[in-house]
Image (spheres, rainbow, N blue to C red):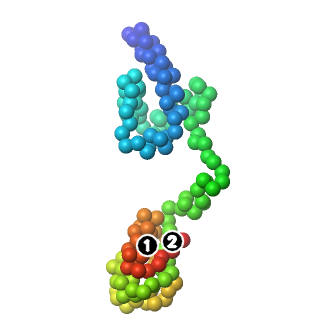
Amino acid sequence: MAEETTQEAATAETEVKEAAAPAEAPVEAAAQTEEVVVPEKFKKLVQEIEGMTVLELSELVKVLEKKFGVSAAAVTMAGPAAAPVEEGKSTADVELTDVGANKISVIKAVKDALALGLKDAKDLVDGVPSMLKTGIKKEEAEELKKKIEEAGGKVTLK
């Protein structure tokens, strides 16, 4: 029984050594492909990793970093490729900035999107620039912006 445990540990260490090189590959490349073909020699290891919790994966990464003297940190670039700070926000404010030529369609879109009465929607549209919603999720803000712009209005996300 002790021999089996020692043999399993040696096999696991060999698998970890073999997996170290692919672990350094950029995650973005794997995320862009729809289907990842796993070589036969790594299938068992990949299955084991799939069964791990996030905490266990974190521990494994730390062990591999120490064992092989590598870092799993992503390389960041400065300059125009760096993301603006505003993109880190998870909420947005939606402001109607221009009604456009089709005011009635914009009023209807505002009324439906915000579940307002006709008078309230008209008052918002007449009071351009006016804040439609504040502190909503980015996805909801983009959806609201799309609806208003399809009706002919102009919206700014802040």
Q: Is residue 40 visible?
A: yes
State the image coordinates of residue 96 (x, y, percent, origin top left).
Answer: 48, 80
Q: Position of residue 66 (x, y in %)?
A: 60, 28
Instruction: Tell me the quadrant of the picture where the C terminus can be found.
Output: bottom right
Residue found at x 61% / y 46%: 76
> Which disc, if any, is residue 157?
2
Name the foreground residue: 133 vs 83. Answer: 83
How many badges with numbers are in the image? 2
Q: Quadrant of residue 11?
A: top left
Query: Is disc 1 placed on a helix, strand or loop?
Result: helix
Give the camera-side residue of 9 and 137: 137
Q: Quadrant of residue 6?
A: top left
Q: Residues within 10 Å of mark 2 (few under 14, many from 20)?
A: some
Q: Vertical placement of 77 versus 54: above or below?
A: below
As displayed, is residue 136 above or below residue 50? Answer: below
Taking the spot 37% from the left edge, 33% from the top edge, the residue there is 37
Decide: marks 2, 1 in contact (CB < 8 A)? yes
Residue 115 can be seen, yes or no: no
Residue at left offset 43%, top offset 64% = 139
Tell me the residue at 49%/89% (across/down): 127
Q: Quadrant of the N terminus?
A: top left
Q: Amino acid at mark 2?
A: Leu
Q: Reading the chain from its start, which is encountered first: label 2 or label 1?
A: 1
Q: Nearer the viewer, residue 138 or 56?
A: 138
Say which element carries label 2.
strand
Q: Is residue 144 left or right of residue 17?
A: left
Q: Is residue 153 above or below residue 48?
A: below
Q: Position of residue 89 (x, y in %)?
A: 54, 62
Under mark 1, the amino acid is: Lys
Which residue is labeled 1 in the image?
145
33 w.r.t. 22: above or below: below
